[in-house]
Amino acid sequence: MSTCSTVSRELDESIAGTAATARTWLLLEQPGPWGAKALTSSHLDPALGRALEAAAEGTGVRIALIRRPGRHADCGTPAPRQVYAAHTAPGDAWLHSAAVDDPRALLDLDFAALGRGEQRTFDAALAGRPHIGGPLALVCTNGKRDRCCALLGRPLAAELAGSGVEGVWEVTHLGGHRFSPTLLVLPYGYAYGRAQAHAVKEVLSGVQEGRIVVEGCRGSSAWERPGQAAELAVRVAVHEDGADALRVVATSGAAPHWQVTVAHVDGRRWSVEVAQGASLPPRPESCGTSVLGSPAHMEVVAVHELRTAALAG
C-alpha cells in the first residue's frame, strides 16, 4: 500500500501555499515519545499542555515540542531544557532562546504580546536572550500524526545532525505530512516539503545570508495560505530572494478566489490572483485514514505589477 507522501509525490501535487500559519513559534524541548496531540500526550504534564494550549489560543502563537535527533523512546528529560521563541514577520523576524528547569514557567508569558512580536515578555519571563548561532531546522518526525513523518523525517534529521549541521531538531507537527519530510526554518518561518539533506543545507546557508530558497518551499508561516502562494509567485516572477524584501499587505476575497497585494521594500507592488482548487484524483490525505479526499491547493492565476500612477489614483 502506498503512503500518502508517495501518492502526493507521484501526482506531483503542488506544495506552494501549504505552510502552517503562525506569526510566532514557541518551542519547548520534550524528549520521549509523542502522541498525535503531543502537548497532551507526551512526557509533558498533560495539565500543563492543556493550559499552554488555552493560553496560546487566538494569539498568533503556535506551540510545538522539540527533541534532539536520535534514539529517544524513553530517555530522561533534561534539566534545564531548551526553549525557543521566533517571530516570523518580515523586517521584524527574531529568534530568542532560554533554558528552563520547570516548563510551567512558560505560563508566565504574555502570549498576546508574544504573538505581536514583543520579545520582552519572553526575555523577562524566562531570562531569554537573542539566539547565538545559525538558524533552526525543525524536521517533523511525529509518526503518531502520520507514519510518513517518522519514516522520512527521522532519517533526514539524523542525517543532517550526523553531518554536523547545527540547529537541527525534531518537531511534533508542521502540517502537510503528505509532503514529508517537512521542514520549518527559523527565524524567517519558511516551510519546505519533500526535503532532502543537500537541499536543506542550501536552505540554511541561504538563511544565514538573509536569502530565501524558493525551490521546495511551501510558504512563509507569517501569512495565510493565499498570501503564502502569492508571495512565492512574486519571488519567482522577479527573481527576488531577500528574506525581508517582500510582505503581504492586503488580501481581499474569500475561498475559492482571492486578490493579494504583495509589496517590496523598494516601493514596488503586485496584485496576485489566487484561486483554490481541488487536487485530483481523490486520494487518502493521510496514512491514518482510508477516506478519499481532494486536498485544496493554491493556484496563482496571474501576477500583475501595479504602476505608480495606478497607486496614486
Image (spheres, grey):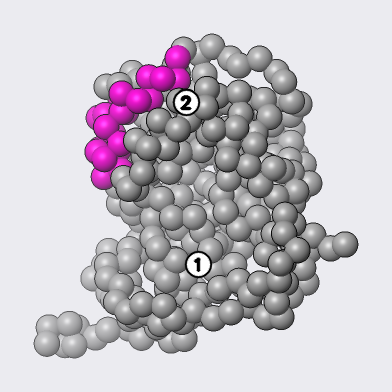
Label 1 CA crowd tier, 10 Å (few <14, some 14–19, many 20+): many
| Residues at marks 1 and 2, CA–CA distance in whole angstroms | 34 Å
Camera-side residue: 283 or 140? 283
Q: Residue 34 placed where, x, y %?
A: 65, 33
- Label pair 1/2, CB-CB below 8 angstroms: no
**Label annotation for residue 47:** 2
**Label annotation for residue 46:** none
Residue reaching furthest to the left: 313
Q: Residue 309 placed where, x, y %?
A: 16, 88
Q: Residue 280 placed where, x, y %?
A: 67, 80
Label 2 CA crowd tier, 10 Å (few <14, some 14–19, many 20+): few
Is residue 113 in the magenta section?
yes
Circle 1 residue = 17
Check disc 2 and report its element: helix, strand or loop. Answer: helix
Residue at (71, 67) in percent of width and height? 291
Kind of residue at badge 2: Ala
Quarter of the figure with residue 84: top left
Kind of residue at badge 1: Gly
Which numbered disc, 1 or 2, marks the residue closer to the eye?
2
Residue at (11, 87) in percent of width and height? 313
Magenta stretch, main secondary structure, is helix
Q: Answer whether residue 178 is visible to the viewer in this image.
A: yes
Q: Residue 197 placed where, x, y %?
A: 71, 48
In the visual, does 62 lie left or right of 291? left
Camera-side residue: 141 or 165? 141
Part of the protein shown in magenta: 102-123
Quarter of the figure with residue 129: top left
In the visual, does 55 lie left or right of 49? left
Residue at (84, 63) in percent of width and height? 2
